[in-house]
Amino acid sequence: METITLTIDGRKVKGETGQTVLEVALKNSIKIPYLCYHPKVSKTGACRVCIVRINGTILKASCVEPIAEGMTVVTEDEEIVKIRKFILELLLSDGDHNCLYCDANGDCEFQTLIQRYDIQEVKPSASRTPKEIDYESSNALKRNENRCILCGRCVKACREIQVSNVWSFTERGSETHLVADDGKRIGESSCVKCGTCAQLCPTGAITFQTVIGRGSNWELTSIPSICIYCGVGCKIDFYKNRDNILVKAMGNYTGPNEGHLCVKGRFGFDFVHSEKRLKKPLIKKNGVFVEAEWGEALNLVASRLREIKDKYGPDSIAALSSAKCTNEENYLLQKFIRSIIGTNNIDHCARL
Ligand code: FES
């Protein structure tokens, strides 16, 4: 890798061969606005919101412009602001972007830019045709195509991260729109509900069902955590509402999962508040489970294990451990099974 020195907004910064102007700027905390760019998917260069002035003359999309030795970059001037506003106004005019009833209100990259560039009322475009809203075909995702700005992040997330290829664009020009499979509603498509498209969506076009009606984005508090489902140890930022109820899970980009989650990590957290969660051990008496104290339950387990071992031998017993336990708990169980019971019949749910 060759080190390249360039100047962005008067600051000398360094990057490496193959990096783009936007990547180097972001790494140096220089803010260039963007919409179609996302660090986790390949570059599209579609929205042109990220335009910058290169070497004092030409305007280029910084997300796809490779850096060069001695390059000078201006990230904002009068003309750039004018063009960015024009692009944002065009996008705004082509959809239904009323934040008042949008699920992404308060957590929308498009809204942030609209406010940053002080865009006021925009007339709806003549070619705008209202699209169907898929409120509930999927219990994971809600889709409102009227809020889609055709950035393509969801298409790339589905193709490059989840490798499911559910989303794609169809038609041409002003008729271009997003389809799941060959035009199915999400719930009827081959979507596997990883939710990566919703996590990357910069507007309210694809949102999570779990949060709808359970709090506005600014009321949610994030809690960093680790997924309890398998051995990968994906990092998750859970979001709880004012009632301390978990309503959303977002993949954390610093974990081994690099922001990605599977359906279990993304949506399998409702058990946390389930009334059915065991709070006390249960013992079956006369064919019915009844609550018991820990002492009674543990004594029963110990005596039955001893009975079975004495009668049928240690290999008649097996233990299945759980990814929901800590490493220490799993270690102790295998130690107990091998040393105390005397069998190697021990396995773990993450291996199945
Ligand atoms: Fe660069 Fe969209 S972010 S063109």
Image (cartoon, helix red, strand yellow):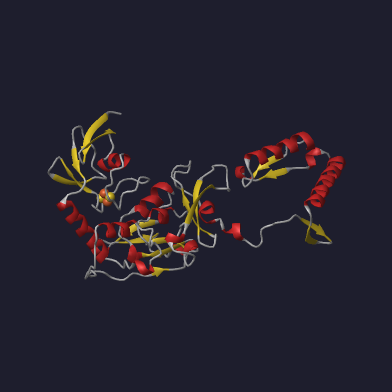
Q: Residue furthest top?
A: 2
Number of on-image labels: 0
Along the horizontal axis of the image, is 238 left or right of 174? right
- In this picture, is 254 found above or below 293? above
Residue drawn at 31 percent across, 66 percent down = 97
Front-most of 325 and 216? 216
Choose top left, top right, bottom left or bottom right for residue 83: bottom left
Front-most of 309 and 16? 16
Residue 321 placement (x, y as % from top left): 67, 44
- In this picture, is 149 found above or below 130? above
- Quarter containing the C terminus: top right
Residue 106 placement (x, y as % from top left): 38, 60
Along the horizontal axis of the image, is 115 left or right of 222? left
- In this picture, is 184 found above or below 225? below
Residue 113 placement (x, y as % from top left): 28, 57
Choose top left, top right, bottom left or bottom right for residue 107: bottom left
Front-most of 309 and 327? 327
Visible in this render: residue 219? yes
Choose top left, top right, bottom left or bottom right for residue 346: top right
Along the horizontal axis of the image, is 119 left or right of 135? left
Residue 332 placement (x, y as % from top left): 70, 38
Along the horizontal axis of the image, is 55 left or right of 317? left
- Quarter containing the N terminus: top left
Q: Residue furthest left?
A: 57
Visible in this render: residue 45? no
